[in-house]
Image: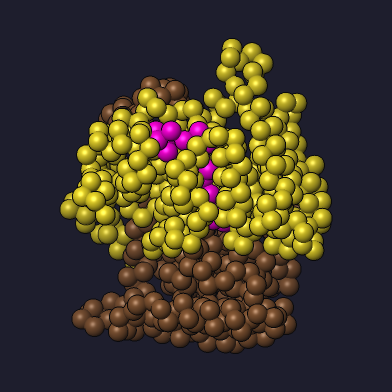
Chain colours: A brown, B yellow
Amino acid sequence: MSTQATSIRRSRDVPTLVAAAREGDHRAVARLVSLVENDDPVLPEVAAALAPHTGSAQVIGLTGSPGVGKSTSTNELVRAFRARGQRVGVLAVDPSSPFTGGAILGDRVRMQDHATDSGVYIRSMSSRGHLGGLAAATPQAVRVLEGAGCDVVLIETVGVGQAEVEIASLADTTLVLLAPGMGDAIQAVKAGILEIADVFVVNKADRDGADATYRDIQGMIGLGERGPGEWRPQVVRSVANRAEGIDDVMAAMDKHREWLTRPLPGGAGAHELTRRREARAAAEVEAIALGALRARIGNLRGGEALPTLAARVAAGKLDPYAAAKELLSTLEV
Amino acid sequence: MSTQATSIRRSRDVPTLVAAAREGDHRAVARLVSLVENDDPVLPEVAAALAPHTGSAQVIGLTGSPGVGKSTSTNELVRAFRARGQRVGVLAVDPSSPFTGGAILGDRVRMQDHATDSGVYIRSMSSRGHLGGLAAATPQAVRVLEGAGCDVVLIETVGVGQAEVEIASLADTTLVLLAPGMGDAIQAVKAGILEIADVFVVNKADRDGADATYRDIQGMIGLGERGPGEWRPQVVRSVANRAEGIDDVMAAMDKHREWLTRPLPGGAGAHELTRRREARAAAEVEAIALGALRARIGNLRGGEALPTLAARVAAGKLDPYAAAKELLSTLEV
C-alpha cells in the first residue's frame, strides 16, 4: 500500500478527504463513511463540506427478512443501474448488530461482482459508536456517497423491524423483498411492512408457494384504504439469482419515481419527493440534536448522575419518571 | 358490560386503577397498560404508585423471526409456570408496527388457552403514541404486571432487529427461538442474536435440518470468547406445538437464574441480576428524559422550528449538524 493510501485511510483532514471523494477516490469515500460510523468529532465539518453537493441522488431502500435474497437482488439492481450509465452507491446497513462489527463480515462476502467497477461504491455500516444511532448516521453516509457523485444510493437493511422501518423512511422509494414460505400475509401485517413498501418484490418466484405469496400481498394491499392520487404499492416477481424479473423491478421503481415527482395540486411546484426529503431531514436533525443531549445526560456529574438514579429506581425507591425529572433538572433545560 | 367495568375501561383515576390492579382486576391491568402505551399524562403518577411493588418479578424475554413458533412456545411456557403455581404476565410487544394497531389483531388470535385463567395476564402492545418508544414503554408495562402480582413476566417480541435487542435488554433472561431452515449461522451473527441470547431454543426440532441448526448455533457459541464465570448460552430443542422439550427450556432458564443470582466475587452481596436491573433502569430513565426533550424540540416556535430548519437542510442550504446546533440553542440547553 502506498504512503498516500495509508494516509487517506487514517486521515481526518476533511478538505482533503472531501476533495478526494469528489474526484472518485474510493478510499476517501470509505474513510468518510468510517468517520460517520464512529461519530467522529469532525463530522459537522464533513457535513458542511458536503451539503452543497447533496440533495439530487435517488435514494432507494431495500429490506426484507434474512434469506429472501437481498444481497443477490442488490447485486442485480446495481448491474441494471450501471447499464443505464448511472453511478451507484450501496450502503448495507446492519441495524441489528449494535455490538459486533458484523459489517466487516458483510463487506467481505458480498457483491464481489462489482469489486472492480469504479462506478460502484459498496460500503457496510453498523451503528457502533454513533450516538444518534443509524437514523442519524445513515443519511450522513448517503451524503458521502452523493458527494462522491453517486446518482443512485441503495440502502440495504437486514430484517423488517422498527430500525429497518426508520431506515426505509430515509429512502425515496422502498423495496420490500419477500420469498415464498417465509411467512404469510398476517406476518407481513405484523411486521408493519405494508406501511413502508412502495414496491413489493416476490423473489425466488420459481419456488413453490410464490403464487400464494403474490396473491396474499395483493390481497393485503387491496384491503388498505388510500385516497385519490395516493400510491398503490406495486408487486413484482423476480428470481434474482437467475437475473430474472429485474427489469420489472426497475420499471416499478421508475413508476414510483414518476409518482413522487408529479406536481401536487395547489403545491406551487412542490411534490411528494420534496415533502419526503424534508421529513427525512427533520428526522435527521432531530436525531443529531437528541444524540447531543444524550451525550450531555451521560456526562452529568462526571457520568454518575444517571447510574445513581437508576440504582434507586431498580430498588423500587424512586419511580423512573421522577428520576427523569431529576435528571433533566440537573441538565438545567 | 356493567357500569363499573365500563368506567374502569375508561378511567384515568390512578389510585382506583392501581388498587384494582393490585387486587387482580384484569380490566384495571389492561387499562393501565393502555395508559402506558398511549403515554398518558397520568403515567408519572402510575409509576410512582407502582414503584414500591416492583423489582421482584422474574422478567423473561422471548424473541425470534416470524414463523419460528413464538406464540406456541409462549403458550407452553405459561402453562409450565402456572404448573409451578406462579402468576404469569405476558406482554406481546410489536416493535415493528409503529403505524397500525397491529397489537389488536395479536390479542385476538393468540393464546386463547389461558383466556379463562385468572392467574394469567396477556396483553399486546405497540409503540403508537409513546414518545420514548418501546424502550420506555415496555418497562412501565412490566411494572404494571408486577404491581398486579405477577411472579413472572414474559416479554415476547417479533423479529430480531435492533428494537428487539433493546427490548431483550429489559429481561433478566432472554430466549431466542430458532427453527430449522429459517437461516444459517451467518444469518444469526448478522442479526446480532448471539449477543443477546441466554438460551437458544431450536423449536420445530422434529423437522429436517434441526440437527444442523443445533450444531451451527453450538458452533457459533463455541467461537465466542468468554471469561471465567461468564454465562455460556444454553441450546435446547423443543417441539412446542406438541409440548415437547418445554421442561428442558424451563431447566435452562432456571440454570440461568441461578447464575444471575450467584454472589459476585468482591461484590459485597451484589449479583449480576442487580447489575442488569440497574442498567435497565438507567436505559429507562434516559428514554423518558429523551422523550421529554424530544417533545420540547417538537414544540419549539409553535412546532415550526424543526420543519423550517429541515427544509433548508433538504435544499442543501444548511448542513444537518449546523441545523441541530441551531435547534439546541433555541431550546436554550
Instruction: Look at the image and tell me in which quarter the N terminus of chain B lies.
Output: bottom left
* Residue at left offset 46%, top offset 49%: B116
* Residue B149 locus on image (x, y percent): 43, 33
Relative to A304, is A70 on the left or the right?
A: right
Which of the pair A211/A231 is nearer the observer? A211
Query: Which residue is located at x 51 percent, y 78 percent?
Result: A217
Please provide percent x and percent y for residue B276: 55, 30
Labels in figure, total: 0
Q: Is residue B299 left or right of residue B152?
A: left
- Can residue A276 be seen in the rendering of this structure? yes
Q: Residue at x 37, y 67 (%)?
A: A277
Q: Quadrant of residue B53?
A: top left
Tell me residue B136's x, y (percent). 40, 42
Closest to the observer, A218 or A244: A218
Q: Where in the figure is residue A149, as x and y percent of width and height?
A: 53, 70
- Foreground pick, B276 / B48: B48
Q: Quadrant of the C terminus of chain B?
A: top left
Question: Is residue B320 positioned above or below B283 on the image?
Answer: below
Residue range of the region highlighted in magenta in the rendering: B145-164
Q: Residue furthest left?
A: B302
For residue A149, say whether it is visible. no
Say if B41 sits above or below B189 in the image: above
Residue A113 against residue A283 in the figure, above or below:
below
The structure residue drawn at horizontal position 53% and vertical position 72%, both measured from the top left corner, is: A185
**Residue A154 is a magenta residue:** no
